[in-house]
Amino acid sequence: MDLFQIIALALVQGLTEFLPISSSAHLILVPQLIGWVDQGLAFDVAVHLGTLLAVVSYFRYELVRMVSEWVGSLRGAGMSPDARLAWAVGLGTIPVGLAGLLFKDQIELYLRSPLVIAVTTLLFGLLLWWADRRESQRADEYAMGWKTVAVVALAQAVALIPGTSRSGITITAGLMMGMSRQGAARFSFLLSIPVIVLAGGLESKALIEQGTGVEWGALLLGVLISALSAYLSIHYFLKLLDRVGLVPFVYYRLLLGVLLLLLYL
């Protein structure tokens, strides 16, 4: 990989991981559209590590409280709001973890084509638009019920299909269940932490089994760029969310989906 490809793909991962436009789709499409050789599994692991560092850093104070209160709940101290949120994140990860273990090979084999990405980009973009129009500024991540947690968790499992967007579909599900934009987005980002850890663990295992050489300089640069860009993406997305809503991302998804249909049909 040359320097430009490293920087470009790390920025793609960092900027799109937490926006409702599907980072996996962009990491598949960008090399295909430009004609780059596949960046390889090691680089994918590196840029996912960068986004993990970003979200953990951004929510570091919330995470400290959540872990502390969760441990307290195990010791019988009761279920505080932070403990409930920690349980929600943990339990909300189970469906996507099971789906990943059961269907990962089938998804990799059959669902990584540009046409699949085009259809899911359009379909779930329209669903995001519909959910955003219904947004009623009610529950935040601390006030959601367990039914909401279950619906968002099941929606997250669907995001294994490229083009769906994990953040997009979880925010959509949260809005449909009566959450505010900020609450749905923040819960989506917290849910990403165990998901990125699980995905990174599986990719790391596959990388070790491959036993191929590693370009450490390229990987370190990828981690740094994806971490910084992901942190900025989270910060400005949450800052601008209530001001501009989700419609700009819907427009982007529709344009991308139509472009892919024109290119690959």
Image (tube, grey):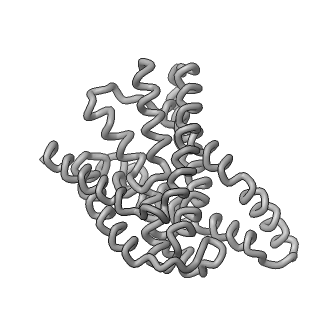
Q: Residue at x 58, y 37 (%)?
A: 228
Q: Nearer the viewer, residue 126 or 159?
A: 126
Q: Nearer the viewer, residue 20 or 49?
A: 20
Q: Is residue 265 left or right of residue 58?
A: left
Q: Position of residue 73 (x, y in %)?
A: 81, 72
Q: Is residue 25 left or right of residue 136?
A: left
Q: Position of residue 63 (x, y in %)?
A: 72, 57
- In the rendered image of this protein, does residue 53 appear above or below residue 8? below
Total numbered circles: 0
Q: Position of residue 102 (x, y in %)?
A: 46, 58
Q: Residue at x 58, y 21 (%)?
A: 216
Q: Position of residue 221 (x, y in %)?
A: 55, 25
Q: Nearer the viewer, residue 37 or 254?
A: 254
Q: Residue at x 50, y 41 (%)?
A: 14
- Is residue 208 visible in the rendered structure shown here? no
Q: Is residue 90 left or right of residue 177?
A: right
- In the rendered image of this protein, does residue 78 appear above or below residue 32? below
Can you say which quadrant of the picture contains the N terminus?
top left
- Is residue 38 visible in the rendered structure shown here? yes
Q: Residue at x 64, y 78 (%)?
A: 143
Q: Nearer the viewer, residue 61 or 78?
A: 61
Q: Quadrant of residue 80?
A: bottom right
- In the rendered image of this protein, does residue 67 appear above or below residue 183? above
Q: Quadrant of residue 82?
A: bottom right
- In the rendered image of this protein, does residue 239 appear above or below residue 14? below
